[in-house]
Amino acid sequence: MIRSLCVYCGSSLGGQAAYQVAANALGEALARSGIRLVFGGGQVGLMGVLADACLKAGGAVTGVIPQFLDRKEIIHPRVTDMRIVTTMHERKMMMAEEADGFIALPGGLGTMEELFEMWTWSQLGRHEKPLGLLNVNGYWKQLLAFLDHMQAEGFVEARHRAMLACEDSAEAVIEALNAHEYPGAIASLEGRG
Ligand code: AMP
């Protein structure tokens, strides 16, 4: 049973109102489900929208932010459980440890980097937590096609490609993460390669 979820998302708002609507809906859905939100701690972009929505709906929120990002991302003033760290690596490690699973909303390079790191740690057997994309207005469509190409070309095992859930609503992605079964680490680590 998932009790906390880490959400990676843009420090920008993106070019469509739909992205903010989705961040808002995910924040509310987490609060409704009694799932604690773990996020990057900023007040800007989709991050801020997400945290505001979760707090407003009575949800529990944990922010993790390096002090040096305060000027760029602005430490969220209403999140009481705010962990101030020093480096990006500490931030990512703490977010990973605090959450039972990971969701990416639309975002930029930081969002992708964070999600992919968790995905690679999973295929290396460092954790068994589920991952998913919230595919707002098909935002991740081209990425999904490229991931299929990576699998077809023999660089990603089918079971690891398949472990990334992709849904177009907050409820559906939370449900998919709850239903997740860890597929095991890459074959060479399990003595099958
Ligand atoms: P972006 O998707 O680029 O708007 O970034 C989303 C979040 O990811 C922001 O809070 C960034 O500070 C964070 N971020 C950017 N690069 C990294 C990185 N290498 N590791 C961890 N977080 C990052």
Image (cartoon, grey):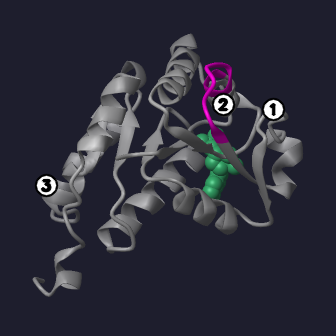
Q: What's the residue at 66%, 24% (across, down)?
A: 49
Q: Which label's residue is closer to the chain start, 1 or 3?
A: 1
Left or right relative to 146: residue 11 = right
Between marks 2 and 3, how big is the CA–CA gap? Answer: 38 Å
Nearer to the camera, 49 or 37 = 37
Q: What's the residue at 63%, 21% (across, down)?
A: 53
Type of the residue with mark 2: Ala
Nearer to the camera, 42 or 144 = 42
Secondary structure at numbered mark 2: helix
Residue 51 tag number: 2
Q: For mark 3, does the 10 Å Cα neighbourhood hold few (<14), some (14 to 19), or many (20 or more) residues? A: few
Closer to viewer: mark 2 or mark 3: 2
Residue 152 tag number: 3
Residue 101 tag number: none
Left or right relative to 109: residue 69 = right
Does 151 sit above or below residue 23?
Answer: below
Say whether marks 1 and 3 touch (CB < 8 Å).
no
Does 127 sit above or below residue 95?
Answer: below
Type of the residue with mark 3: Ala
Q: For mark 1, does the 10 Å Cα neighbourhood hold few (<14), some (14 to 19), or many (20 or more) residues? A: few
Residue 78 tag number: 1
